[in-house]
Amino acid sequence: MSVKVLFVCLGNICRSPTAEAVFRHQAQAAGLEQRIHIDSAGTADWHRGKSPDSRSCQFASRRGYDLEPLRARQVSVDDFHDFDLILAMDHDNLAHLRQMQPTNARAELDLFLKRYGLPRDAVPDPYYGGDEGFEDVLDLVEQASAALLNEIKARL
Ligand code: 4NP
């Protein structure tokens, strides 16, 4: 048995690729990379085919995460049939996903941080802010990813 997880933000160049790389790193460290399929996407198509934001790459790289191979894509209705779990980074992302969710979706849709009871519900968009926003994204995503891994370990 395997589990398929999709992280979704707005542009798929800051928060969700960070979550993809951090969670993949944790899954690999737990020896579960063959059993967890991990991907990310954006609700918007503005950055389709582009590399993650250079600041996201830089701050993630300092903590040992490699975002360089990732390329942005837009979330699609097919994703609701392909994935088991779709995790939105903020309330706007979740609202957008709810609107496109087909009635016979396979995927469970949730807000990433809220699902795991973190003090904040949403991962703030760092795109127009300073360096601290990118560190904040990493801190939040690392904590929630650890909880997600525990949930999946119990399912597998
Ligand atoms: P993300 O951040 O949703 O975390 O990838 C953003 C990236 C780009 C834009 C907004 C947010 N943008 O306005 O282009």
Image (spheres, rainbow, N blue to C red):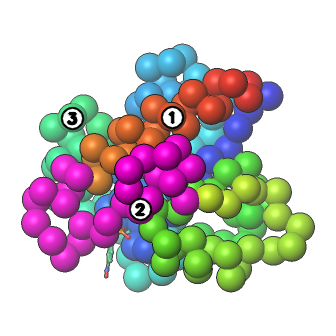
Residue 79 appears in the picture as rendered: yes
Q: Residue at x 67, y 51 (%)?
A: 85
- The label shown at residue 147 is 1
For ligand 1, the image quadrant comes to bottom left
Camera-side residue of 40 and 117:
117
Q: Residue at x 49, y 78 (%)?
A: 92
Tell me: 133 left or right of 45. Answer: left
The amino acid on which the numbered mark 1 sits, given as a three-letter code, is Ala
Q: Residue at x 63, y 74 (%)?
A: 97
Q: Position of residue 3 (x, y in %)?
A: 70, 38
User: Label 2: which residue?
Assistant: 122
Q: Is residue 90 above or below residue 140?
A: below
Q: Which residues are magenta?
A: 111-136
Would you identify the image quadrant in which residue 16 lies? bottom left
Measure the alpha-carbon separation of dots 1 and 2: 15 Å
User: Label 3: which residue?
Assistant: 63
